[in-house]
């Protein structure tokens, strides 16, 4: 995960420098080709948002495609690259713009209170049925961009270390790691994330999958640092509780 984040930063730095050069030369074709190198990461993020909306019944399949949102970035970045001062600012700018486009099109989802209120009562077969329905109904429907490479589709981005962060919690994470493979961890985390409301889920995914800081996420989401930290903490607590109820309590 850390290596992947470093790769993204290196690519973003190289791309930023070239974009500035191509804009100065007014070479729009080369500019767009260069920007395309960093769009798979953004496309993946949009895909997850759209998939969640479909799973939660907030969006009909076929209503949108991730390209409907990412294509606009070619215009936005070209028009604003002179005001973007570094690769870090470019990274944030891309997510900020696509977040604005998504917010204009998607209805903000509320908590699935039924799910979280009853999390203590679900049996193992009920958990398994929910996971099976999730993977059949929504996961991966939009991950179709031809330019995306295999790394962009890697489902191992989610890590238990993003949920179990204290030393005591890490002992629980070790127990889970010993009994669950990466695919099972991913499926469970995505299932629970899709039951959260949009702001909480978005903050967690930007922090976890995209390696953005809480300060950068606050900028993207146009909110306060305190609010971002509260949402991130709440997301972790809900995920931790779900893992404990489903996989740990019965084994203790």
Image (spheres, helix red, strand yellow):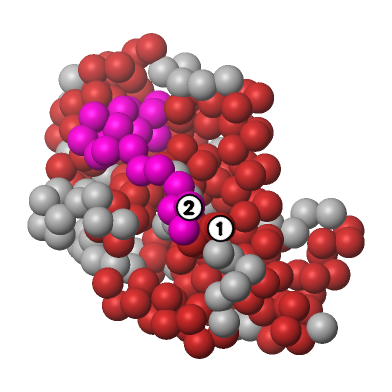
Q: Where is residue 9? Give x, y as percent.
A: 53, 42
Q: Would you identify the image quadrant in which residue 146 lies? A: bottom left
Is 180 situated left or right of 31 in this image? right
Q: Is residue 19 visible?
A: no
Label 1 environment density (alpha carbons within 10 Å; few <14, some 14–19, many ≥20)? few
Helix, strand or loop for disc 1 = helix
Magenta part of the protein: which range?
93-114
Q: Residue at x 80, y 70 (%)?
A: 172
- Residue 100 appears anywhere in the view: yes
Q: Which residue is mark 1?
A: 117
Q: Is residue 180 above or below residue 99?
A: below
Main secondary structure found in the magenta portion: helix
Q: Is residue 105 magenta?
A: yes
The residue at 48%/81% (across/down) is 126
The residue carrying mark 2 is 113
Cα separation, mark 1 vs mark 2, equals 6 Å
Q: x, y percentage for residue 245?
A: 67, 72
Q: Is residue 215 left or right of residue 151?
A: right
What is the number of the mark on residue 77? Answer: none
Q: Position of residue 118 (x, y in %)?
A: 55, 64
Foreground of the two, 211 or 39: 211
* Residue 232, quarter of picture: top right
């Amino acid at each position: 995960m850390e290596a992947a984040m470093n790769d993204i930063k290196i690519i973003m730095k190289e791309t930023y420098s070239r974009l500035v050069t191509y804009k100065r030369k007014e070479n729009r074709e080369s500019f767009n080709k260069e920007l395309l190198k960093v769009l798979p990461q953004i496309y993946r993020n949009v895909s997850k948002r759209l998939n969640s909306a479909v799973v939660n019944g907030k969006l009909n399949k076929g209503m949108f495609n991730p390209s409907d949102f990412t294509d606009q970035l070619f215009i936005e970045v070209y028009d604003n690259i002179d005001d973007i001062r570094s690769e870090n600012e470019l990274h944030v700018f891309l997510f900020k713009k696509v977040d604005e486009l998504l917010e204009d099109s998607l209805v903000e989802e509320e908590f699935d209170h039924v799910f979280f209120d009853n999390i203590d009562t679900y049996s193992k077969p009920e958990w398994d049925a929910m996971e099976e329905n999730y993977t059949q109904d929504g996961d991966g429907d939009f991950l179709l961009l031809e330019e995306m490479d295999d790394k962009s589709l890697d489902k191992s981005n989610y890590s238990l270390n993003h949920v179990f962060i204290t030393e005591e919690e890490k002992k629980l994470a070790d127990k889970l790691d010993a009994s669950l493979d990466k695919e099972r961890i991913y499926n469970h985390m995505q299932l629970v994330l899709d039951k959260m409301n949009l702001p909480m889920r978005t903050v967690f995914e930007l922090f976890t999958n995209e390696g953005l800081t809480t300060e950068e996420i606050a900028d993207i989401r146009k909110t306060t640092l305190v609010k971002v930290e509260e949402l991130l903490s709440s997301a972790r607590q809900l995920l931790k509780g779900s893992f404990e109820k489903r996989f740990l309590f019965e084994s203790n």
